[in-house]
Image (tube, rainbow, N blue to C red):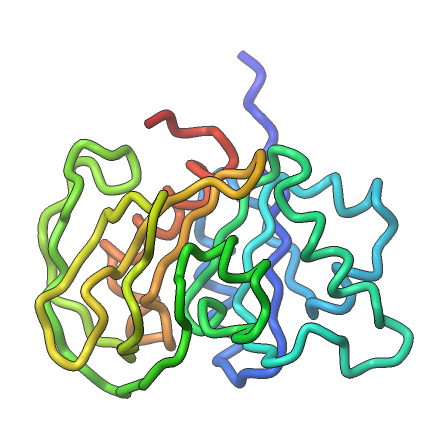
Amino acid sequence: MVESQPLNVAVLVGMHPYDAIRFHDLFAAMDGIKPVHQMVENWAFAEPEQKAEYDVVLFYNMHLKMEAELPWASPAVPKAIAELGDRPQGIVVLHHAILAYPDEPVWTDVTGLPDRKFGFYGEQTFPVHIERPDHPIVRGLSDWTMFDETYTMQEPGEGCDILLTTDYNPSMRALAWTRRHKQARVFCLQMGHDGRSWNIPSFKTVLQRGILWSAGKLQG
């Protein structure tokens, strides 16, 4: 029996500090996933056939402007992001990446968040509720308690399928949702600030399944 090849996942970072060692460990432990960590500018500047090799593009950056800070990469970043969804390549938007590009309509279309003005609250302990237990990303999981940073902002809008919620204050209600952006499946996960949240088993399961779902490897 021939085993399927792991998914090539571009893991994109920039303009926000993070625990790089534990972040790398999070993805390295996921079966079926080959993470390729890089700056957003590196991914954007690659040739089209190179970008097309990725099954999933995962954003963990928090750029506030679409234009690249590095002259050699501009206008590559706006062009690459505008082309997201032109092929059925999965898109995952993780934690602070939902706050990126606050004035860009294209990122509103990707995330499904109509207004991304936000507040943030560190070191919160809050309940996570399975809103859609029939969805393959969360199927078989039970509600759990999360330790993480929370955001307050407008809830996901039309076309979003809410998978995880919380009734905790301060936090937005939606914690995870899916949507479509042109040809692409999009998975957004509000949680995921640092190693303490990354180490929670249910979080790791949801993130891994979200990546697989966005690549069309989980149906539903």
Above or below: residue 170 compared with residue 219: below
Q: Nearer the viewer, residue 158 or 177?
A: 158
Q: Is residue 201 left or right of residue 22?
A: left
Above or below for 116 versus 27: below
Q: Quadrant of residue 72?
A: bottom right
Split into 4 quadrants, where in the image is the C terminus?
top left
**Residue 34, percent from left and from top:** 59, 46
Q: Residue 8 occupies which quadrant of the picture?
A: top right
Residue 105 falls left or right of residue 83? left
Q: Please indicate whether residue 143 sits to the left or right of residue 24 in the image.
A: left
Pinpoint residue 217: horizontal percent, then vertical percent.
Answer: 46, 29
Q: Nearer the viewer, residue 63 or 113?
A: 113
- The residue positioned 59% from the left and 58% from the top of the image is 106
Position of 196 with respect to 65 (left or right) is left
Q: Is residue 161 above or below residue 123?
A: above
Q: Residue at x 76, y 47 (%)?
A: 51
The percent position of residue 201, horizontal first and vertical second, equals: 25, 56
Residue drawn at (23%, 42%) of the image = 138
